[in-house]
Amino acid sequence: MIQTGYFQVLMAALLAGLAFVLARWKTIPVEKEIGFGTVRSFVQLIAVGYALEFIFGSDSLWLVVLAVAVMLLVGAYTAGQRAEHFKNGFSIALVAMTTGSLVTLGLMLALKIISIEARYIIPLTGMIISNTMNATAIAFNRIGSDLKSNRLAVETGLSLGKSWKEASRNYYREAVKAGMISILNFMKTAGIVALPGAMTGMILAGTSPLTAVLIQLIVAYMLLCSVTIGAIIAAEMSIRRFFNSAEQFIG
Amino acid sequence: MSPCQDSTILETRYVTRQVSKNGHILKTVDNVSFVFKRGGVYNIVGPSGAGKSSLLRLLNRLDEPIEGEVLFYDKPLVLYPPTHLRKKVAMLFQTPYLFPGTVRDNLAYCCELRSEEIARSNLIRVGLKSDFIDMDAESLSVGEKQRVAMARSLMLEPEVLLLDEPTSALDPASSKKIEELILSLSADLCLTVIIVTHNPEQALNLGGETLLLVKGQLIEAGETSKLMTEPETELGRKYINKELT
């Protein structure tokens, strides 16, 4: 196991410094972002570390629920910002992400994959919400751009007596697929192209590679489940916003 | 006049449609009333932005009027399920859209392929060879696509065909063929054809009745040959003299 302390983090910050110097030398306009990002990630992660220490130590279920609720709200707000072509992106994202996250988490508890302990629930929910947020945002973006740019195809379908669902089915499918593509690619290449981050972290922290792999597999299947649920709900709810009850395209 | 042209099939009663454009409310159709008879051919003409396409889209409820109503067989459109209505009042757009796949896939899109024979006979009806059915839709010319789109609409067995400038992207020879096709469909199938055209000559070729729209208002309507040669209104005269832009 490697020694980990503030000294090692400070040494690692030299790598960020190298990135800063390279960017400046090549006049790539990201120096501010590198500087800000390095400091911000340090402050945020240290704060989260202390918060998690406190939550794990307090053994309070309410604090776990509060942490999950905050993660969901921030995630839904972020994904909702990507709903450029329709209204209520935040509420749709909240429904999609909450359902995807809670169903997945509930199943993991019911199947006794994890137990109700803050040290399991909070990090796993964080991963679930983060991935579902990305899937939701991508589905939002895809639905909007596809429907807008394929208005003729959609209205041709409607004019041939199809319902809005039938006329837009392909775009719905493509949006869900686009939302899932990241986790699907990850599963295809996991272990071949790169070792997943969580698994690498566990191995660095001293866990045996085989145990790390088993946990990584659980994480991958968990994310696949939540992302699929989230992307389907996000696409179904958002595509509905482009049509009214008279089967008219109002996007 | 076609022998089947005896009853009202579609009627607009004081219909108004407005849209919001750049923060302004714009009336695209303004208080238009007109009666379309079964089996008739109707041209909707007018300068750019007159509301021709907007009016057409109200007839199969792709859009909703904010005032007035449209009736199909004397019943307001809102009383028909939209999916059912649009099979009876089919619409073809200015740019034909064919779904990816073969011509057969497109003919089967609306209603599952009831029979290969019907599909092939509809292809022949629109002036294409029946073996077009196996062709890739993407490989067709615009004129062929427009004909396939028309054959696809005929698979619905519609009673009204709405055509939004169907020949605007075609060369004169192909346009002429489409015009002949429209006339034969109306005569043979008792189909009511309502066509938006920016071309007064095309309206004269198709005959029937013509509606002249200017700024969303119905300025004049009547027999095409009369309206296009001896209009009764000042705006009508300006239109045929190409003074309206």
Image (cartoon, grey):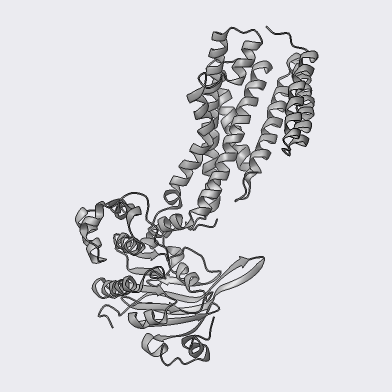
Please tell me which residue is depicted at 72% across the width and 35% down the height of the picture.
A26
Q: In which quarter of the image is residue B37?
A: bottom left
Residue farthest to the left? Answer: B117
Indicate the position of residue A133 as horizontal and vertical percent values.
Answer: 61, 34
Indicate the position of residue B80 as horizontal and vertical percent values.
Answer: 41, 62
Left or right relative to B14: residue A198: right
Q: Quadrant of residue A49?
A: top right
Q: Which of A225/B5 is in front? A: A225
- Would residue B71 be seen by someone viewing this image from the given angle? yes
Q: Which of B242/B213 is in front? A: B242
Looking at the rendered image, the quarter that the N terminus of chain B falls into is: bottom left
Please tell me which residue is depicted at 57% across the width and 12% down the height of the picture.
A212
Q: Quadrant of residue A41?
A: top right
Indicate the position of residue B28 as horizontal and vertical percent values.
Answer: 55, 72
- Would residue B207 be seen by someone viewing this image from the given angle? no
Residue farthest to the front? Answer: A25
> How many labels, in total?
0
Indicate the position of residue B146 as horizontal and vertical percent values.
Answer: 35, 63
Q: Which of B226/B165 is in front? A: B165
Looking at the rendered image, the quarter that the C terminus of chain B falls into is: bottom right
Please tell me which residue is depicted at 55% across the width and 35% down the height of the picture.
A230
Left or right relative to A156: residue A68: right
Please tell me which residue is depicted at 77% across the width and 21% down the height of the picture.
A14
